[in-house]
Amino acid sequence: MQESIVYINGLFTPLKNAKVSILDRGFCYGDGLFETMRAFNGKVFRSNQHLERLFRSLPLIFMDLPMTLYEVNSVVQETLDRNNFKNAIIRLTVTRGINEPSFQIDKEVAPTLVIHARPHQPLPKAIYLKGVNISLITMQAPVLPGVNQSLKTCNYLSNILLRKISQMRGSMEGIIVDPILGVTEGATSNLFILKDGTLKTPATNNSVLEGITREVVLEIAMNHKVPVSKALLIPEDIYNADEVFITNSGIDIVPVVSVDNKPIGNKKPGILTKFLRDEFLKCIEEEL
């Protein structure tokens, strides 16, 4: 298999040579942001939306990236082109850079920017045909002090443990149920339900990320006159839903047929779920 070519701070290098310092704050503290993008037929899907989210997030954590959105977008595409991957997952990571061990933020330190492309490994088709089980896990949703929206940060330990706990329960994904905020999001996904003809999803806040695939699904629903609600959801809403599905850039739209091993609807992927996925795939073809 071809070895990936990785972009690090202005240079392209083979993956085996791609290294960052042990003093990099991303390594030491998880002090950084990332975006995971999907490429189809050599083009990155909704790259502007991913990077706009990144550039909105940077000042919220007092970080500056001395590049324009256009420049970063160009480097992302060049990384993909150099790897010659038609269908790929692209991980962009920006950290606060190399600094002496300290919590103090040094504005003079240059950030570290890494872009890594790898071939996309699709989920088995059976998952989309048969659906999956997910788990609702009660815990306090992680939040950042002074930030009123969820950010895609490199501090991902809670997500990793959430995924592990859900897998131990026989689930593909774990969904956080906050004691105050209700149902929020998954370890790596946004959640949707359909009830009585209305598509519902938790509103974005400092515990629910504005996922790019989530936004595309909402666009498709509104374009087809499907009623949409972004509001508080509780576990009973999920258990009693007519349809449930989860979304993210790597898996697009995955139908959920049981929650905590309790069947949803007729325990088959729902009609609207299949329609939205078909329209999502059409959207990709039209935009690329």
Image (cartoon, rainbow, N blue to C red):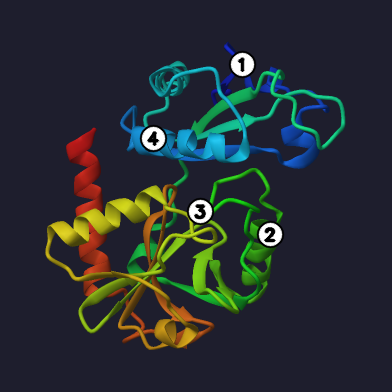
Tag 4 or tag 3, which sits nearer the N-term?
4
Q: Which residue is mark 2?
A: 158
Q: What's the CA distance linking mark 3 and mark 2?
A: 17 Å
Label 2 element class = helix
User: Secondary structure under badge 3?
Assistant: loop
Residue flagged by tag 3: what amino acid is it? Answer: Gln
Are there few (<14), some (14-19), or many (20+) residues within 10 Å of tag 3?
A: some
Kindly identify the residue that appears in the image at 65 percent across and 43 percent down.
154
Q: Is residue 88 visible?
A: no
Q: Amino acid at mark 2?
A: Ser
Mark 3–mark 4 CB contact (< 8 Å): no
Looking at the picture, which amino acid does disc 4 mark? Asn
Q: Tags 2 and 1 in contact by the CB under 8 Å rule?
A: no
Q: Position of residue 280 (x, y in %)?
A: 25, 52
For the N terminus, the quadrant is: top right
How far separated are the C-alphas under marks 1 and 3?
28 Å
Residue wearing tag 4: 87
The label number, if any, that marks residue 149 in the structure image: 3
Measured in 3D between alpha carbons, the distance from the residue under mark 2 to the one under mark 4, in whole angstroms, is 29 Å
**What residue would you read off at disc 1?**
9
Residue 154 vs 225, above or below: the answer is above
x, y percent for residue 284: 25, 42
Q: Is residue 174 visible?
A: yes
Decide which of tag 1 and tag 3 comes sooner along the chain. Answer: 1
| Residue pictured at 75% horizontal, 31% vertical | 105
Q: Counting residues from the N terminus, which is met first, the one under dot 1 or under dot 4? A: 1
Q: Secondary structure at mark 1?
A: loop
Q: Is residue 184 left or right of residue 102?
A: left
